[in-house]
Image (cartoon, rainbow, N blue to C red):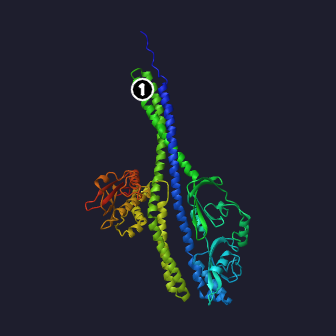
Amino acid sequence: MTQSPTPSIAPPSRPIAGMLVLAALLGGLVVAWVYRQARTEALDNALVTGQQRLGLYASTIRAALDRFSYLPATIALDRQVIEVLSGNPAQAAALSTKLETINTSARSASLYVMNARGVTVAASNWRTETSYVGNDYSFRPYFTQVMTTGVGRFFGIGVTTKLPGYFLASAVRGASGEVIGSVVVKIDLETLEEDWGGGDGAVMVTDEDGMVILTSRPQWKYAVDGPVTAQLRHKLDVTQRYGAVPLHPLERRALLQLGEAARLERVGESTFVAQAQALDEEGWAIHYLADWEAMESNVRSTAALAGLGWIAFILLLLYLRQRRLVLKAKLDARDTLEALVAQRTEALSAEIVERQRTERHLRETQDELIHAGKMAALGQMSAAIAHELNQPLAAIQTFVASSRIFLERGDAETTGTNLSMIDDLCRRMAEIIRHLRVFARKSPVASQAVDPAASVSRAVALLAVRLRQADIDLVWTPPQGLRVAGDPGRLDQVFVNLLANAIDAVADAPARRILLDAVPVGGEVVVAVADSGPGLPPEVVDRVFEPFFTTKEVGEGLGLGLSLSYGIIRDMGGSIRAENRAGGGAVFIITLPNVSGFT
């Protein structure tokens, strides 16, 4: 009896090899297409973000200047200022003391009064070694402007203090209307640079000569955005605008024009998407430069993920084919079966490694998407928040002006009352800004014991302006002692999404009312957000948590808020569902495990 030979696995046939080559070519095309689409989307997002940032930064600059715009003109009407400039120098010391007090209250850099020759006769810094008193600043452009037009504006480095600032000047007129001097306030704008330094891009402001006067990159300060010509050197030397600062070019090189309002450029060793906006009143320009290298890195990661997905697909096809061969080999011999099983195990191990890497990337993408949802919510609230901040700012200006009058009259009691009101307004503005900073902060996910009632209350505070503007009756009594396990920042976002949707739902309702409730039920905590709106159509109830599904008009929402909320609650071990209330309106019910130690 002869022994049959052991079957062996044949090498890949030519058709299979051809299919692998074709799959590799198609995979390359897929990766190239994904890379191109991701690059286009990243660039579009950068342009939109750049325009938004430019508008925001321009508003902060204008607000910083407008805050003090009234001060020189108001002080120019002061009787003591007119007396000193009219030939009563004995009052100069008392005037300096008054300017010192006003400067401290207004929080400006300095205040000073110059006579018609440009010599400082009184200053808020008269006690310091760098006092302006007695110094001649007639060579400064703002003095020439104020003597000819009545007002002056100028940015430069102080000749005496060597500190940069923005100068606002207003003429002081005598009894017959002639200009007898000027009042000047110096404003410190460098605090804006500290705020800009926390952003992910670069910001700079250039004056009419192209000099970088404000920037989030210290190495760019006082560089010239353009050629350093002899005419420019002479002009700056005459006015001593920037003191002894050496002039050097910024060396910006354009790489590619991106439409009319942006371009890809290189500054030093870095590449940016640059956009600019003019500040016409000052003759300045504000520039926002988004880090293109960071965007390009994200684009490459996306393309790599697409390539891994294609490889996983090909591996799946190969795996299915291999499995068929294994099943066939089981009929032939045990030895062949063991060899194929070993080969299959090796392939599965490689696939598991790839899958784990892909899942990790997907989790990171989900974190970015959740943070983007926060930014979208802040964007929708930005107009209302700006209005909420402008009201106390206007009130503060009124109280400061009236306090100055009451101080001159010696009415300390009324002045004290005004200062208390200003303090209350400042606290109110600080509370609004604190809520925004906490909500917008991007922190690592960490599970901890969270008070869901506190998260609801923070969401109510963030949306208080919209609730008040829409005249909505909010019913909410925060309970005590509730605890669930999760990340507080993400839980805040869930309630902001639900409460914002409820505000939209009751916008056209006859009775605009939102009810919030949080109670322990057994071993769980149940939080309900109910509204008096029209409710959810039956065909929508089962789809509200699907990504990109929305019942809002085009441009009013992407349909990601509820989908992100569903994922956050699920990751916390809970559930969320939508229902229609018996009395009308919709209700969203969140159930989370209770970790507070009671039932």
In this view, the residue in front, 550 or 199, is 550
Q: In the figure, 100 relative to 437: above or below?
A: below
Quarter of the figure with the N terminus: top left
SS for tag 1? Answer: helix
- Determine which quarter of the picture holds residue 290: bottom right
272 vs 524, nearest the viewer? 272
- At a point 67% along the width and 90% down the height, the residue shown is 88
Q: Locate residue 246 relative to residue 544 in the image: left or right.
A: right
Given residues 125 and 448, the one toward you in this image is 125
- Nearer to the camera, 95 or 146: 146
Q: Is residue 237 above or below residue 338?
A: below
* Residue 49 spot, x, y in % from top left: 52, 58
x and y percent of residue 98 in the render? Answer: 61, 84
Numbered-mark total = 1
Q: Extreme front residue here? A: 260
The extreme top residue here reads 1
Report whether residue 112 is seen. no
> Which amino acid type is marked by label 1?
Val
User: Percent x, y for residue 396?
Assistant: 50, 77
Q: Locate residue 146: give its quadrant.
A: bottom right
State which quadrant residue 464 falls in: bottom left
Q: Residue at x 50, y 80 (%)?
A: 399
The answer to whether residue 407 is visible is: yes
- Residue 12 location in percent, x, y? 49, 25
> Is residue 353 positioned above or below 281 on the image?
above
Mark 1 crowdedness (10 Å alpha carbons): few <14, some 14-19, many ≥20: many
Residue bearing the label numbered 1: 326
Image vertical order of residue 14 relative to residue 459, above or below: above
Quadrant where the C terminus is found in the figure: bottom left
